[in-house]
Amino acid sequence: MPGRRVYRVKGANLKKNISKLLGALVLLSIFAYLFQTYSVGEKFGRLVVVVGNIAEAMKNAKHAYEDVDIVISDDELKEINISKISKEIKSSIDKKKELAASKTPMAPAQIKADEIRDEEKPQHNKTHPREAKIVKLEDLPDKFKPLKQYLHQPFKMGACQICHDTSSKKPGALVQKEIADVCYECHKTRYTKEFDHLPVKDGRCTDCHDPHQSNIRMLLKAESTNDLCMKCHDKKSTFKAKAKKLFVDMNLETKHKPIVEKSCLECHDAHTADHKSLLYMDAKMDLCLDCHDEVGEKTAHSNFKHGGVNTSKKRCLECHNPHATKEKKLLNKEPVALCLSCHDKEVKSDEDGGMLMNMKKHLDENPNWHKPIKDVKKEGGCSACHDPHGSDNFSILRKSFTKNFYANLENKDFFCFECHSEKKITKQFIASDEHNITAFRDGEVNLHHLHVNDRKGRSCRACHDEHASKYSHLIRDYTDFNGIKFPLRFIETPEGGSCAPACHKEFAYDRVNPKGIGK
Amino acid sequence: MRTFATLFLLLFLSEAEAFTIVNPYDKEIKEESLASVVVEADFAAVDSLVISNDANETVTLEVNPKRSHYCKSVNLHLGENSLKVVGYKEGKVVKEETKELFLTSQVDKEYRYPPKDYNKSYFHNDENEKICSKCHDMSVNEVEGVAFEDITKSNCYECHKKINRDEHSHAPSINWLCTSCHNGNVGAFNQTDNAKTKYSVPDPIEEICLSCHKKHKEEWSKKRFHHEPAESGRCNRCHNSHSSPSEFYLRKPAWELCTGCHKEKIEGVHIVKTFGRKAHPTHNVKDPSREGKDLSCVSCHNPHVSNAPSLLQSESAMGLCSRCHKK
């Protein structure tokens, strides 16, 4: 019924025409969109090629290979080393045969039982084959009773003969001269890494392990792993080690957690290791970072690094003791003293090659110290401001500060204000009830504000030394301005003081009788 | 005839030996308004010396037998000065000597160029220092980069202390870091000073000034227009690098300083005439844009560099006016 599909357009029905046109356009655009997104064109192109190929093949349907005639002359044959080729072919065939043989299941044993017996008999060098004699547990000597929790397998079996020479008159005589040789008879893993534990090296297995029984796993000869280690490595132990550093004093206040909570074996291998001190990893840093990975991140990726940990000889161990110390954070020494043990000379900075000041000398010469280093116990010493593992702020400071003489303090997030009140700077006048904010004022005029809140505001370091000074209030004796050291010439009076730096002529201030500065 | 000649010679010698002015030389050009007078006097011939300048400021020096040399600083005024030293012996004038000096000024066209017969002189050479070293330590006792805790300890201080007598003193000067500028070098404009004195300052002085005032170096190079003295690096034309009664160590108060060269701006109408038929003031009133300061050329013009023509402080005309006329 084709008549139904014909649209009947009567007259010029513009509205209907337009809607039709629009519909066609929408359809077209949808089609174009689909064409584009599904890359129909490309697919169609490929289809054409494939169909073309099939058609081509059907047209020339002829799938027979043609013979190739090769004529080799006698002279050419002579040049070919047939013997070598034949050898190669033979060896490859042999290999294949071997492979095939190995894959096939074992053929039924054709060997005589006697031969097997010969093979299984112990092949000791000096002893003769012995008769097997099993000792029952009840028949063991009294000294082994009562039995402990863990028993050595041969002991449990009652196969004393495996280790002991029963034919000897001496009780407990071994089948071999050296204890280690007896042990290695079964425990075949020889300890062949770079560093050996001295008892292992000397073959004194029984120094640590009981060959019969123990209440501790691994048949240890002590109450716990740590106790066993401390038998020799305690400072008070009578063990005469060649080097004193092998002693560990675990009686000190701060102990390394893994030792207390787990055991020495968290870091050390009891027998043999590739790293010094029988450690699993490089002792200087890698081993530590295995657990303390956040510190590793800091040391490696900070903009400003501490040479003490990044480029030093002993890395982490420059400052920390891995076992136990008197100080917090397992530090080798008291916080400030520890830092000064390196900073007692000018040290080269890794970042810019400049020289860091001799802090010990500076602190020795200037008796008034900044509180964090003066009151170490409470404030934490140098590390109150500096992060010894590295920081993104210069001088490995924990927060930002400025190197500049001038620094407008607006929008500046200075480290100083972590402890010191910002009001010291921001308040222009200090009322009588707020006198504790700052003592640097002339009457009510806040002289900090006068110095700092200006177009050319001076930074804290213009007048104050962050570490120590011979004047009170950590006033510098010299301020560095463009590479020249100018003395501040600060003189303190009971209710004020005066300065005569390079910046201005001598000005005096007085808290009680104002001198009229800043008016 | 011969005896007469010897007598005359003796008379002349005795006359000459009463005192001699070691410094300054005659017809000397001065740049600072101070002259250090050094007189060598013989106690046998003279017992007091009176030094006087044109302003009739007199200094009397008593001659004593223990000393041979006497020093004193005397004030000078711009232009030609005559400095008179009179030697007395028991109230009678023994000898009178006058030295003509010329004090130049870079910021005053009248006094910028001294007459031809005047010459520059140099004091700090080995020969002169040998004389001084009888009383003074002539070595440099400055530690490089560290100012004196007590400035009177500086070896320069004793003879040159008056150089910092004015209110506004430049930090290196008041801290007696003399050799940080007086480094003995010479520049393109003072090649003739080379090796004549130990403490010459290069002219242009820019490199020394900008070694501390680093910010200027960066900022100025970016600007379009430069004032000639700033461009040629002769900061010391307008600034007295020692001390000055004017702020910014200017050689004169700003308005006077500018009009020293730009003389045509003193009279006549500068800036538009307003409806009141009065010219815009350029000085003698308060500057609304700078609290507590007087109006001067620098209220509208930047004395160093600017991106605006005529070195105006603001790039837009309205911006300039609105610095004061806020509405």
Image (cartoon, coloured by chain):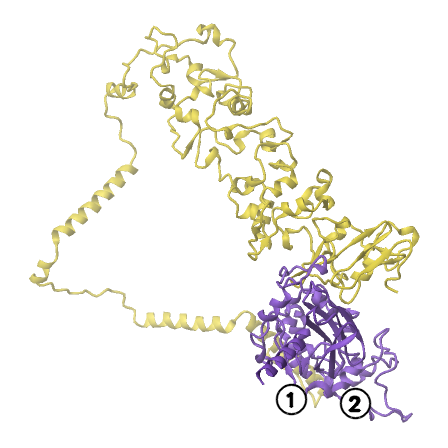
Chain colours: A yellow, B purple
Within 10 Å of the Cα at label 2, are there few (<14), some (14-19), or many (20+) other Cα atoms? some
Quadrant hosting residue A326? top right
Q: From where the camera sits, is residue B300 visible?
A: no
Quadrant hosting residue A78? bottom left
Q: What residue type is labelled 1?
A: Lys
Tell me where residue A341 appears, x and y as whole percent.
59, 41
Query: Marks 1/2: CA distance?
Result: 30 Å
Upstream in sequence: badge 1 or badge 2:
1
Quadrant housing the C terminus of chain B: bottom right
Q: Is residue A194 placed above or below A207 in the rendered structure?
A: below
The one of A220 and A414 positioned closer to us in this rendering? A414
Q: Mark 1 points at which residue?
A: B116
The one of A319 and B215 positioned closer to us in this rendering? B215
User: Does residue A301 appear to the left or right of B255 in the view shown?
Assistant: left
Tell me where residue A219 appears, x and y as whole percent.
49, 20
Q: Is residue A217 placed above or below A193 in the rendered structure?
A: above
Q: From where the camera sits, is residue A369 visible?
A: yes
Q: Mark 2 lies on which chain?
A: B
Q: Is residue A262 placed above or below A157 in the rendered structure?
A: below
Q: Which amino acid does label 2 sit on?
A: Lys
Q: Name the residue under label 2.
A: B265
Within 10 Å of the Cα at label 1, are there few (<14), some (14-19), or many (20+) other Cα atoms? few
Does dot 2 land on a helix, a strand or a loop? helix
Which residue is depicted at the point 85% across and 88% down? B280
Foreground: disc 1 or disc 2: 1
Q: Do the residues labelled 1 and 2 touch (CB within 8 Å)?
A: no
Tell which residue pokes out farthest to the left in this image.
Answer: A74
Quadrant hosting residue A28? bottom right
